[in-house]
Image: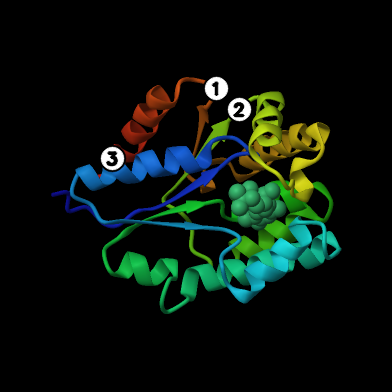
């Protein structure tokens, strides 16, 4: 049984980068160490998450600033909700692995609104806590697009255009450069076989455990 403090880990990557699979594998590996692990995702299932999904599906058009604000509101609920919030889960001694977090707002919304405003409101929000680790799954945007086109019946707004996926990847890198050492970000090559990648990620996470 591992007794180090509970970890808050975030997975990021462009759409179709394989986050769900790697999150599941990390959860299993941590559980085998005797740790208690919860997984969460953004957008959440909150009412605000529903407003966001209406926009991602293309059914309700919003400005990028409006969408960025909704993502922040949803992220605050993700942190402080008394039943399923990150703070509550960590307080119970559980590790939390989130599928996306504020890095996605920086990359996706940063493409078409004032990125410094998006950074400021997220990083300086008292209810939004900093992750212990962000794992960025780096994959070739063309293979992501192929995977999405094969596996999904309805595409969301950020999954429609391969050029947009390339720009989003570039924006993630620009953001990571900008954040420097202020955040613990590890970029991994996610083009490699699934098991090999899972082992690499587990080794990174074990480095945070006493
Ligand atoms: P995604 O992980 O693809 O969820 P699903 O598998 O349910 O479609 O995330 C949904 C989309 O939301 C994705 O295209 C990225 C986008 N997004 C933002 O634009 N900003 C954000 O802050 C977050 C968290 C996600």
Residue that sits furthest to the left in the current view: 1
In this rendering, position of residue 153 left or right of residue 4: right
Q: Sort mark 2 into few (<14), some (14-19) or many (20+) by Cα contacts within 10 Å.
A: many
- When the figure is inspected, residue 18 is found, relative to residue 132, above or below; the finding is above
Residue 29 - label: 3
According to the image, what is the colour scheme of the structure?
A: rainbow
- Residue 139 — which label? 2
User: Tag 3's secondary structure?
Assistant: helix
Q: Give yes or no for contact between labels 2 and 3 (Cβ–Cβ under 8 Å).
A: no
Numbered label attached to residue 62: none
Does the image show residue 77?
yes
Closer-to-camera residue (96/186): 96
- Residue in front for this viewpoint, 93 or 163: 163
Q: Which quadrant is home to the C terminus?
A: top left
Labels 3 and 1 touching (C-beta < 8 A): no
Return the disc, 2 or 3, that comes first in the chain's sequence: 3
Relative image position of residue 94 (x, y in whole percent): 30, 60
Q: Residues within 10 Å of mark 1 (few under 14, many from 20)?
A: some
Residue 108: percent from left, percent from top: 73, 48
Mark 3 to mark 1 CA distance (whole Å): 21 Å
Q: Does dot 1 land on a helix, a strand or a loop?
A: loop
Residue 104 is at least partly visible in this image:
no
Of the image marks 3 and 1, the number of the one nearer the N terminus? 3
Label 2 secondary element: loop
Which residue is painted at 54% across and 37% down in the image? 136
Marks 2 and 3, Cα distance to the nearest angstrom?
Answer: 23 Å
> Disc 2, disc 1: CB below 8 Å?
yes
Kindly give the residue lying farthest to the front in the view shown.
Answer: 153
| Place of residue 102 in the rendered image (x, y in percent of width and height, measured from the top left) | 60, 55
Instruction: Identify the mark nearer the N-term, 2 or 1.
Output: 2
Q: Quadrant of residue 57?
A: bottom right
**Badge 1 is on which residue?**
191
């Amino acid at each position: 049984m591992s007794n180090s403090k509970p970890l808050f880990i975030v997975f990021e990557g462009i759409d179709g980068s394989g986050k769900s699979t790697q999150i599941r594998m990390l959860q299993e590996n941590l559980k085998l160490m005797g740790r208690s692990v919860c997984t969460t995702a953004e957008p959440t299932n909150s009412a605000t998450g529903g407003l966001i999904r209406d926009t991602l599906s293309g059914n309700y058009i919003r400005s990028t600033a409006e969408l960025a604000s909704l993502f922040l509101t949803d992220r605050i609920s993700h942190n402080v909700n008394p039943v399923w919030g990150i703070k509550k889960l960590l307080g119970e001694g559980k590790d939390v692995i989130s599928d996306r977090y504020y890095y996605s707002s920086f990359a996706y919304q940063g493409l078409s609104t004032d990125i410094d405003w998006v950074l400021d409101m997220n990083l300086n929000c008292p209810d939004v806590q900093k992750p212990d680790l962000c794992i960025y799954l780096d994959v070739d945007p063309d293979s992501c697009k192929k995977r999405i086109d094969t596996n999904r019946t309805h595409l969301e707004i950020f999954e429609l255009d391969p050029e947009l996926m390339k720009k989003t990847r570039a924006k993630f890198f620009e953001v990571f450069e900008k954040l420097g050492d202020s955040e613990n970000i590890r970029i991994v090559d996610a083009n490699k076989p699934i098991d090999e990648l899972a082992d690499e990620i587990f080794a990174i996470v074990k480095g945070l455990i006493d």
